[in-house]
Image (spheres, rainbow, N blue to C red):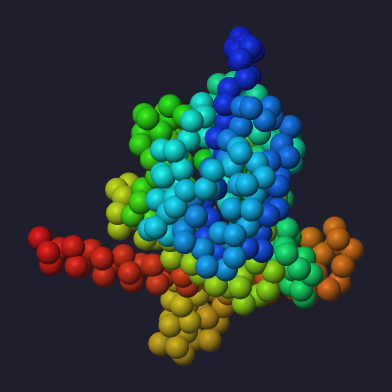
Amino acid sequence: MELEANHLKDNPVTPKVSVIIPCRDEAHFIDQCLESVLASEYPPDRLEVIVADGISSDGTRQRLEWHATRDTRLRLIDNPACTTPQALNRAIAAAQGEFILRLDAHAWIAPDYISRAVQNLEEWGADCVGGAMRTVTPDAGVFAKAIRIGLSQRFGVGNAHFRTGSEQPRSVDAVFGACWRREIFEQIGGFDERLERSQDIEFSTRLRRAGGTILMSPEMKIHYYAPATLARFWRHNWSNGVWAILPFAHVSGMVVRWRHLMPLALVVGLAGSMAAAAGTGIAWLAWMIAGPYLAANCIASAQNAWKQRSMKLGLLLPVVFASLHLAYGVGSLWGCARWMAICIKRKARQ
């Protein structure tokens, strides 16, 4: 969906921006994140940075205090609950800016990211804006490059435009490194503190239901560290899969997008076809789902390997794509079990 720029707005006063960062045990990443924000081209007197720390114990706290003593724009607040939504809500309550920009400690931004966020919100009249995410990995492990590619391809992540990119600004369902007008939180509330994960997806859904618009601007560059090893990649995707389902236990309506449920459909389909083959003795039934998926996986992997001129990627990408989809789908299956358990307990208390 295309948006039209609103060139009628002309605000000569530079608005104040509050960058909020939820953080816990991020000693390996927090320095680069903060340095990118504090080195921003945005006017220093119109910028504040609030980090909500969840009682870090790996040296993160010391790094935060070190930065705070050297730059008065940085404020550190406590998040004793140690969950992301409570960290975000605490930081928003402490923020003084007219615009709120949320970053993860695993991310860092281009020098013009903040100024472009404000400019886009003003020119396009959107309620939220985010940039084009560039996935990077913290080391050069065997699967590192394949993971970076897998997380930026449509076969891997579907129509998540903030991951796959876009040539033009466009209306989307969610963004990474989001910047909102402050009044949005006054209108629809803060982040749902019952959701340890996926609270950003639920908030974006609530915003769109209220008539708000979310803009993805490809000129806004933001980088994100992804897990570099296959084991960590599996664990991360499994957890994402769990929390693609658990919001349904707390929030009514369709919280996530259909792309978040496709891995679950794949896993259920694979299990069902294998069960059918075992029950009927018809071996080819086991390949009803697996066959088309393997074909699509190999085609997508070959195409990306050809673009990179790398035979090695042709061997690694099928493993990465399968790890992304299957780990996510199995996590969602476990999420369904937890959802049912929550509903049973809730009904028993009534």
Q: For this view, does 158 lie left or right of residue 54?
A: right
Q: Quadrant of the C terminus?
A: bottom left
Q: Seen in the image, is 341 located left or right of residue 261?
A: left
Q: Is residue 315 above or below residue 215?
A: below
Q: Going 86% across and 60% down the picture, which residue do you hit?
A: 308
Q: Nearer the viewer, residue 207 or 13?
A: 13
Quarter holding the N terminus is top right
**How far from the left and from the top, in percent, is residue 259?**
52, 54
Where residue 289 sits in the image (x, y, percent)? Answer: 54, 71
State the residue in front, 104 or 155. 104
Residue at the extreme left: 350
Question: Looking at the picture, how far across and down is residue 150, in whole percent?
Answer: 69, 62
Q: Is residue 306 visible?
A: yes
| Horizontal arrangement in the rendering, residue 211 relative to residue 292 (left or right) | left
Q: Residue, x 15% and y 63% (percent of image)?
A: 347
Closer-to-camera residue (46/191): 46
Question: In the image as oriented, which residue stretches furthest toward the right?
Answer: 309
Q: Residue at x 43, y 65 (%)?
A: 242
How many labels were placed on the picture?
0
User: x%, y% of residue 251?
Assistant: 31, 50
- The residue at the point 41 percent across, 70 percent down is 333
Q: Quadrant of residue 92?
A: top left
Image-based side of 343 in relation to 208, left or right: left
Tell me if residue 15 comes above or below residue 246 in the rendering. above
